[in-house]
Amino acid sequence: MKGAAQDAPNRAGSLADLVRPYPEPPAGHVSDSRLEAVLRSGRFAVTAELNPPDSADPADVFEAARPLAEVADAINATDASGANCHMSSIGICALLTRAGHGTVYQISCRDRNRIAIQGDVLGAAAMGVRNVLCLTGDGVGAGDQPGARPVFDFDSVSLVRAIRTMRDDGVFLSGRRITRPPRLFIGAAENPCAEPRDWRPERLAKKVEAGADFIQTNYIFDLPVFEAFMARVRDLGLDRRVFILAGVGPLASARAARWMRSNVPGVHIPDAVIDRLERAANPAEEGKRLCIELIGRMREIHGVAGVHVMAYRREHLVSEIVHASGALDGRRPWLRHPDA
Amino acid sequence: MYRVRLFAVRHARRFEWLYGRFEAFMAACDPLFSRLGYARVERPVAFVERLTKGFLFDCRMCGQCALSSTGMSCPMNCPKQLRNGPCGGVRAGGYCEVIPEMRCVWTLAWEGAARMRNGGGIHEVAPPVDRSLEGTSSWLRASREKAAARREAREAGRTALARAYPGARASEPATAPLADEPAR
């Protein structure tokens, strides 16, 4: 946050206040993302997922970001996750970047075709987005409007390659030139605990080959499975080519865990974890403790560069969890100065 | 048919061999197709292709067949039509997120590719499908592409030769020709 103009976006400023030179990345970086800087410097990174509002009020976005901002290097804006309609990820990112927050703009292939997505990537980059996360997206049947037409023009891997082509070659997939290419730190997801487990590391290799700079995984509750995955990832040398952020989150209760397991695509929770919640006198507290423990274990796994905290409807706990886990190692992520 | 499709993946190695032979045959037919006109043979070939591949692989005639790189499991049967799967939603036992009673097309693809002699194509990043080619014959497209690649290789030789003898190329261009030759 430098000028006063950014602090008062509604003030009728001059055009010169709005038009700043598009930043070129520092040497050795692909973007001027703070998340990229943290990861490249070898520090353990933290990202957190924002619960998108069902509202048109910007205040609701800033309110949702508040508990995450003090511990996250970047905030993920989900793109109609679970095929449920909410405020768009590009809208959320546009607001958050105005306030100076680092954002991860999530793009799902489910709802938009290649024309829309490539245009949005330029638009997002122009609005200050520095990180994107390329996702296939959950099927429309999982959401609140199952009658919608699924698009899936790209898949996550071909989308990663398309954005890398835009960034590094400065062209759309049509070959038409982009006068100022988007400087983006490109992310993809992986789900180490989902079948076919033997092939998950191979598919990760494909995403790296396509151009992924960082990976955010789905929820990991099954540590042995994740450790086996990471061992194979290291064998393939992928940990040296991509930054891997392990997905974690606090479970509210055994019932909530069971519900997630059977209703949210791609969530794998072992029975042992559910039993532990069931036996606990205070399941919510136990879920939090479990999450803190998991973060601690993740820090010890060679090749894990950070954690991605997804605390759906429990965002108020994120700060406490991250602090208790020691993930930041005393580091303070960028925070908007309260009286700036 | 679902069961035939599963059979094809189980026997991916045999189908790979068969397909390799068939592709070579189609490529060899390129001069014939060129003479008849690809436009004229398109409809009858596409008709046969639709019937055969429809029966064996539940082919959707995307026109950009990648079966040899997907363990003989047609990616267009994936409800998300991923060309680089599987997605993260695969259920326990390798079942589809969207159609829970169906084996995941891409789980089968990786299994099939592992059975193949040259299944490594599955590691290549596949581009999105060009929807304007839907319904057209992939066999003819493969034949044209194979033949074009062969011509290009010949072309590279001609270019190298012309570059190696630049003087002759300048004084007697016919001795190191570069212009398109008419079909013979």
Image (cartoon, rainbow, N blue to C red):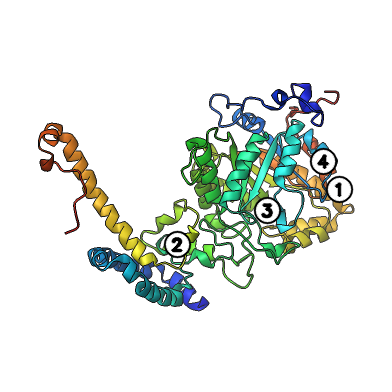
Q: Are marks 2 and 1 on the same chain?
A: no
Residue A20 location in percent, x, y? 66, 25
Counting from the top left corner in percent of width and height, residue A332 is at 75, 27
Q: Chain of mark 2?
A: B
Q: Determine contact: label 3, label 4, CB under 8 Å.
A: no
Left or right: where A57 falls relative to B38: right
Mark 4 Cα within 10 Å, few/some/many (few <14, many 20+)?
A: few
Mark 1 belongs to chain: A
Res. A130 visible in picture: no
Quadrant position of the N terminus of chain A in the picture:
top right
> Same chain for marks 2 and 3?
no
Pointer 2 residue = B133
In the image, residue B66 above or below residue A94: below
Q: Amino acid at mark 3?
A: Asp
Q: Secondary structure at mark 2?
A: helix
Whole-angstrom CA distance, mark 1 to mark 3, is 19 Å
Pointer 3 residue: A222
Extreme right residue here? A281
Q: Nearer the viewer, mark 2 or mark 3?
A: 2
- Which numbered disc covers residue A58? 4
What secondary structure is found at the residue carrying circle 4? helix
- Mark number displayed over residue A285: 1
Dot placed on the residue nearer the N-terminal end, 4 or 1: 4
Q: Name the front one of labels 3 and 4.
A: 4
What is the spatial separation of the Cα atoms under label 2 and label 4, in whole angstroms? 44 Å
The picture quadrant where one finds residue A214 is top right
- Pick the front one: A35 or A176: A176
Dot 3: chain letter: A
